[in-house]
Image: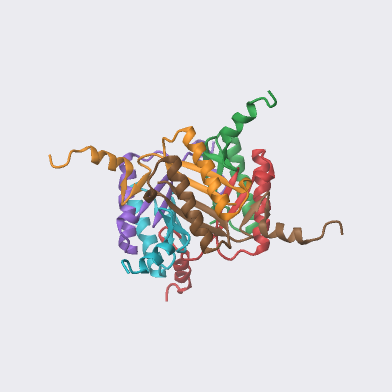
Chain colours: A brown, B red, C green, D cyan, E purple, F orange
């Protein structure tokens, strides 16, 4: 412990994933006083139809914003 | 909050995913009295060998049911 | 399936929990065409220091809002 | 219940997945005294850049180990 | 990895928790060929109003069954 | 998104929880280029019998280490 599950939208680069893993681990070690070896991070990526806010999926929200308003 | 993780078998259509996100959000807002903007839903899909009931994966169960019984 | 994990702030009543379980299950059955018996919902409650938005826990946010502004 | 979520690195065979589902279910039934029908297992697979220990993803760790040391 | 999250109803004894942790770990090591040191298990317990099947919480189901039928 | 679930052993102070929430959020925003408002962190605490490594719960491991070796 700590064991961390992070949910992301799909599409992050390898570099971003490596950077965020290192940065979160540093953040946790510094603030909780644990050894880095005890920190495990699991990333799960979600597609645009697999995440919603206010009942609207990211994919649907994206479509709607492409529609010019006021026409 | 609420933050909701929903596990589904793979294969739902975009329409189904949009409909279930909207319907769950309505259900939560009505019964818990929260604003829709606070409701987030994460969907994770699982393949037929990644879900089991009673120690039998959905894939294995499907195979077995294709075997004619009594022959 | 579906198996649903719902994260809530602590403090919901028994009546609210029963109502939301029934309402989410109805929402899922109607939109995904599954039988109610296949729907399982797990609720996990989180205290005010165990949920944060923008790096500020709900507890800290609550404290800050109690401080009169402009004094 | 019990409902079990198992996180694995990608790449397990169908045979391994079927074997581990059966074995975990047996383990749980024997020690907790529950019926097999109540045991559900969800598997989520993670790629090599989606799992890290000590802030280093499995992919980065693998790369580093391929570099000959001392040369 | 594997990292396993197990959801249980509240009320298991220390002995049961120790036994199921050992048994699941054995099951995973035997079937997946991993070292025991890589297996981590997290248990989360859920109260009777925090788990529902078919839209009915375990608590409500329990109450209903206490009502004598046929009277 | 990102939505982060962090599993900790019980016993962290309010100050530690507030510090780790702020630090993880900073780490994520810096490396992934997201706005802080999109980062949500859920903490779940686990007791000493609810976390095991290599099939041994933290509670059992703690007990064993109190037994003097070699006596």
Give coordinates of residue E38: x percent, y percent: 34, 56
Query: Which residue: 53% across, 49% down?
Result: F27
Residue sitting nearer the eye, B22 or A58:
A58
Look at the picture and state if F43 lies above or below E40.
above
Look at the picture and state if B29 lies above or below D69.
above
In the picture, the quarter occupied by the C terminus of chain F is top left
Look at the picture and state if C54 lies above or below E33.
above
Q: Quadrant of residue C60?
A: top right
Q: Quadrant of residue C55?
A: top right
- The extreme bottom residue here reads B71
Q: Is residue E53 left or right of residue E5?
A: right
Give coordinates of residue A27: x percent, y percent: 47, 46
Residue sitting nearer the eye, B47 or B53:
B47
- Tell me if I can see residue B66 in this picture: yes
- Tell me if I can see residue D43 in this picture: no
Query: Which residue: 61% across, 63% down?
Result: B12
Q: Is residue B32 left or right of residue D52?
A: right
């Amino acid at each position: 412990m700590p064991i961390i599950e992070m949910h992301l939208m799909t599409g992050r680069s390898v570099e971003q994933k490596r950077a965020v893993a290192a940065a979160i681990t540093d953040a946790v070690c510094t603030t909780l006083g644990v050894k880095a070896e005890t920190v495990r991070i699991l990333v799960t990526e979600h597609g645009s139809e697999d995440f919603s806010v206010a009942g609207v999926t990211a994919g649907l929200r994206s479509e709607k914003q492409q529609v010019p308003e006021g026409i």
